[in-house]
Image: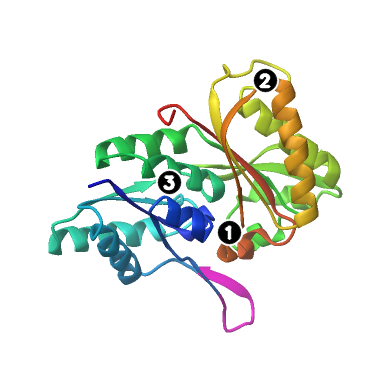
Amino acid sequence: MPLAVVTDSAACLTPSLAQDHGIEVVALHAHTDETGASTTSRPSVEELARAYRSAGGRSREVLALHLSASLSGTMDNARLAAQQVSAEEPIEVEVIDSGTCSAALALAALAASGAGDLRHGAALARESAARSHQFFIIDSLAHLARTGRIDRTTARLGGVLGIRPILTVTPEGIRAVETVRGAARARRHLIAQAVHAAGGTALSGPRPPAEPVRLALQGQDPQILEETSAQLDQALEEAGAIVVERHILPIDEALQVHLGPGALGIAIAPARGLL
């Protein structure tokens, strides 16, 4: 019986993609607080336990892969839910902090879903997450600053006129990898960062050795997403990057609360072990 994989909606998987790969998705919650402000909350222990039991109906080995603990308390509830289910059912649940979020989390979950057992699936998920790159840009840092998802140093960049930081997700949180001026320039540099991570030559300095990669692209504006997708494909081809898997993913409602409008992201992950 194959491995069952559970993740959360921060992975931004489409329902059809999750269904095709047998991945169960637990929703993060977006709602309005008593002041009228948009906010989010983690899945409850009960919701997570219910998903693990459901996955356990397909396999006695369940891999629970969730967004970084630096961005959400979901991992705390996931560990409690796994202990509860493992104590009550003949199901082994292994909980992994991906150390990332969004499309990079999706790529890790997809990597694990093809494994035949928990040990192999956990190894694939950890490798994909640890060696992935999640880059993104947004119109304003105000939403991330308001919800406490960026540190003060990064948040101060939002007060500099015209500055658009290229952001990345690390196990320690969200950080700026470079800053540029202007939205169009930011999109070009976002693509350049992704191409470099894929083994291309878009940036100066040493580049990683070329190896097969998987990528996922996300955006809120359909026209910008289409244009970026075409520019990214051309840049990857010109750089000689080897792309073996490609996805266009939405941005989860809960993530939109923290990102605000204008989010555009690219995730790159290794494909080793999947070919």
Which residue is painted at 71% across and 60% down in the image? 142
Q: Which residue is mark 1?
A: 148
Which residue is painted at 86% across and 50% down in the image? 161
Q: Around disc 3, counting alpha carbons within 10 Å, would you say few (fewer than 14), some (14 to 19), or many (20 or more)? A: many
Evaluate if marks 2 and 1 touch, with contact meaning CB atoms under 8 Å apart.
no
Q: Is residue 202 visible?
A: no
Q: Position of residue 91 (x, y in %)?
A: 18, 55
Q: Secondary structure at mark 3?
A: helix
Q: Around disc 2, counting alpha carbons within 10 Å, would you say few (fewer than 14), some (14 to 19), or many (20 or more)? A: some
Is 32 inside the magenta-drawn segment? yes
Q: Amino acid at mark 1?
A: Gly
Q: Position of residue 232 (x, y in %)?
A: 73, 36
Q: Secondary structure at mark 1?
A: loop
| Segment colored magenta | 31-40
Which residue is painted at 62% across and 65% down in the image? 257
Q: Around disc 1, counting alpha carbons within 10 Å, would you say few (fewer than 14), some (14 to 19), or many (20 or more)? A: few
Q: Earlier in the sequence, mark 1 or mark 3?
A: 3
Q: What is the number of the mark on residue 240?
A: 2
Is 68 inside the magenta-drawn segment? no
Q: Earlier in the sequence, mark 3 or mark 2?
A: 3
Q: Which residue is mark 3?
A: 109
Q: Earlier in the sequence, mark 2 or mark 1?
A: 1
Q: How is the image coloured?
A: rainbow
Q: Position of residue 70 (x, y in %)?
A: 47, 50
Q: Amino acid at mark 3?
A: Ala
Q: Quadrant of the C terminus?
A: top left
Mark 2 to mark 1: distance in Å? 39 Å
Q: Amino acid at mark 2?
A: Gly
